[in-house]
Amino acid sequence: MEVSTSILSVKRDNCIQTFYNLETAGTDYFHIDVMDGKFVENNTVDLMTEYSEYLNSITNIPLDVHLMVEDVMSYVKSFLVFEPRNITVHYESAKDDKEILEWLSFIKENNCKVGISLKPNTEIEKIYNILPYVHTVLVMTVEPGKGGQELIPSTIEKIKKLKDYTKKQGLEVDIEADGGINLDNVKSLRMAGCNIIVAGTSIIKSKNYKKMIEKLKNT
């Protein structure tokens, strides 16, 4: 299991030190939650741009960019400059599959991996025909938009269904889960087929980042 640490709740005044501590604690990725205040309520664009600039100059840990935005293409271009490992777009941001595929090929043309994300109420079957074109599926296990929520249990079943489908089809995709993940539910996610988890609050609020990340990876 890999851990992508959401830096949404990192305090600005000591963010550089926190990023350094997370790197030495063994996070696999820094999860960049980009929210435009339209697709979801919160607006984190300035903060995430600022944090991505810092991270780009101080660490080699890859950036895992999650776009919760309406105007997808303009944000794709803004965040490609940070050379992230991957950029994940939301299924619900597009008017149709054709538009999603255009976004995905643009991102790939810029030497970046691609992901598709879906909200808790969007059925997993909706993205089946997009799966051959993505590296990652990011299953939201809470409603996107703010940190510190509780994981919605039905989303675990959704991950299981996705894992079974990709196995049957012989598709190789990372399954990433995001929202309300902690030591109480991480094992269920792993067993359902998840191989990357996004954790924010549970790591940032812990007394020892290294211990918490190790536990999340190995529970």
Image (cartoon, rainbow, N blue to C red):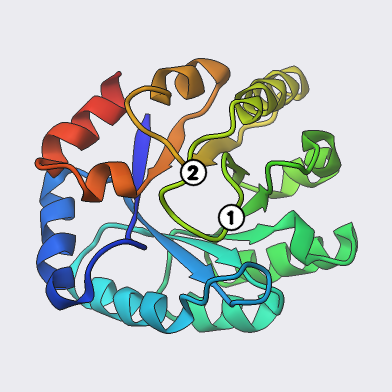
Q: Residues within 10 Å of mark 2 (few under 14, many from 20)?
A: many
Front one among 121 and 58? 121
Q: Quadrant of residue 110?
A: bottom right
Q: Is residue 69 left or right of residue 212?
A: right
Earlier in the chain: of badge 1 and badge 2, it is: 1
Quick check: 106 above or below 117? Answer: below
Return the x and y of residue 51 as percentages of the image width and height.
Answer: 31, 75
SS type, badge 2:
loop
SS type, badge 1:
loop
Q: Which residue is mark 2?
A: 179
Return the x and y of residue 24 as percentages of the image width and height.
Answer: 11, 49
Q: Is residue 34 left or right of residue 114?
A: left
Residue at screen point 61% across, 65% down: 68
Return the x and y of residue 78 as percentages of the image width and height.
Answer: 52, 83
Q: Which residue is mark 1?
A: 144
Quick check: 1 above or below 16? Answer: above
Return the x and y of residue 94 as percentages of the image width and height.
Answer: 81, 65
- Please say if the residues under marks 1 and 2 sit with CB atoms less than 8 Å apart: yes
Residue at screen point 65% across, 20% down: 160
Front one among 7 and 11? 11
Q: Amino acid at mark 2?
A: Gly
Q: Residues within 10 Å of mark 1 (few under 14, many from 20)?
A: many
How many marks the image carries: the answer is: 2
Quick check: 57 above or below 207? Answer: below
